[in-house]
Image: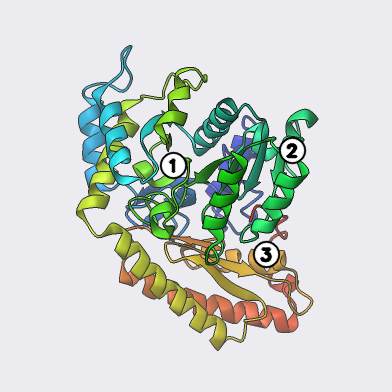
Amino acid sequence: MNRYSKSEAMLDRAERVIPLGAQTFSKSRTQYPRGVSPYFADRALGSRVWDVDGNEYIDFINAQCSVTLGHCDPDVTRAVQAQLQRGTIFTLSSELEIEVAEKIVRLVPCAEKVRFGKNGSDATSGAIRLARAFTGRERVAVCGYHGWQDWYIGSTARHLGVPGAVRALTHTWTYNDPDSLQKLFAAHPGEFAAVILEPMNLVEPAPGFLQAVQALCRREGVLLVFDETITGFRYALGGAQEVFGVTPDLATFGKGLANGYPVSAVAGRADVMKLMEEVFFSFTFGGETLSLAAALATMGKLEREPVIPTLRARGERLLRDTQAAIDRHGLDDALSLSGHPSWSFLQFKDARGTTLWELKTLYMQEVFRRGVLAYGTYNMSYAHGEDDLDRLATVHDEVFDVLARGLRGGVRPLLECEVLQPLFKVR
């Protein structure tokens, strides 16, 4: 019997009414190879997810890093249930908006004032519009992934539907290479409004890199924006800016801010944020109370309990165990590890006549079969226990043996599905 028969039937049904059958590219068949993947979840609790076929998984994706505490965290659930009895959205603002903003201002170094959105893309787009208004300039330099809106996605291969005039205003540059940013400034003097970057993703910032970027921005009158959609409330209470000691002009937050509830934030210097009184950044659901209650409960738990040190410690063990398995199976030419312990990456490489996409597809096929939900990134949650890491180590040992066999005799004969195709390169 097909392990994923209900998921596949549901996908067929979904595709009749939903393009791709999913609301997010990262949950669609573009990222999950058909025939060997689950597509629909039934429920989740703690570190576990169950698909509609009843298969149980240890979740190392955690809704693209948005779940930090664990699924259905009891403290967050209680806060949301209590607020549900009082109302979800009002004709007037609620005190929760003040309380959550005050908490962010207290925790985040750059935050003097705060505005809320629903998705990370809302926050990054709001920050860019604000920077353009504040500086009177239009060009933007980007480094990392910053959402689906025209100003950013136009700089990627997924720019269908984005006007050429918009695309021309966004410029990419290279992480850990401040000279690549300086060249952009030199090519378009006095034209850049903002530099936006993920302060860390695949690799740590080189010594002095973030400071050099900040100095360049100050010299050129450009606003520095840290996209902390993932790093915020995961690397530290104050985000990556606290960890690396560089305070940007603006920062954006989302994902783990509310343990999976839809809320995001733009935060930064009061003089810049004051322009939000004029810049149109306004949402019917910007003050939706369930997500704000979840955010307040999440940040409260992050303050009370050793959440962030635990994410780091368990992530460090995961990296040690995984590197040991890579070494044991002789896969150093095909696999490598990078990132922060709380948000790390298993990177696949072309090796021995096998493409990285063939290798990644085989990896996913095999880990899914063994009850692990992972596709090359390990997004830790507070709910992950040592038993989960024990199981992942066992699964990696078995799966890396399969990968080594594929590299010796060919991956294609071991695949029970088509090979994944790249969506677009971000990092």
Question: Is residue 156 in sight in this rendering?
Answer: no
Identify the residue under disc 1.
253
Residue 118 in which image quadrant: top left
Residue drawn 66% across and 34% down?
151
Q: CA distance from mark 3 to mark 1?
A: 39 Å
Image spot of residue 376 (x, y percent): 56, 63
Q: From this view, report whether residue 400 is shown above or below residue 114.
A: below
Q: CA distance from mark 3 to mark 2?
A: 32 Å
Image spot of residue 140 (x, y percent): 65, 38
| Chain-order first, disc 3 or disc 2 | 2
Q: From this view, report whether residue 29 is shown above or below residue 335.
A: above
Mark in front: 2 vs 1: 1
Identify the residue under disc 2.
159
Mark in front: 3 vs 2: 2
For label 2, the crowd category at 10 Å Cα-Cα, with few meaning under 14, some 14 to 19 and many 20 or more, is: some
Q: Circle 1 sits in a helix, a strand or a loop, which is it?
A: strand
Q: From this view, report whether residue 364 is shown above or below residue 149.
A: below
Image spot of residue 300 (x, y percent): 23, 45
Q: CA distance from mark 2 to mark 1?
A: 24 Å
The quarter of the image holding the C terminus is bottom right
Tag 1: amino acid = Phe
Q: Is residue 303 left or right of residue 116?
A: left
Tag 3: amino acid = Glu
Q: Circle 2 sits in a helix, a strand or a loop, which is it?
A: loop
Residue drawn 49% across and 17% down?
278
As drawn, the label of residue 416 is 3
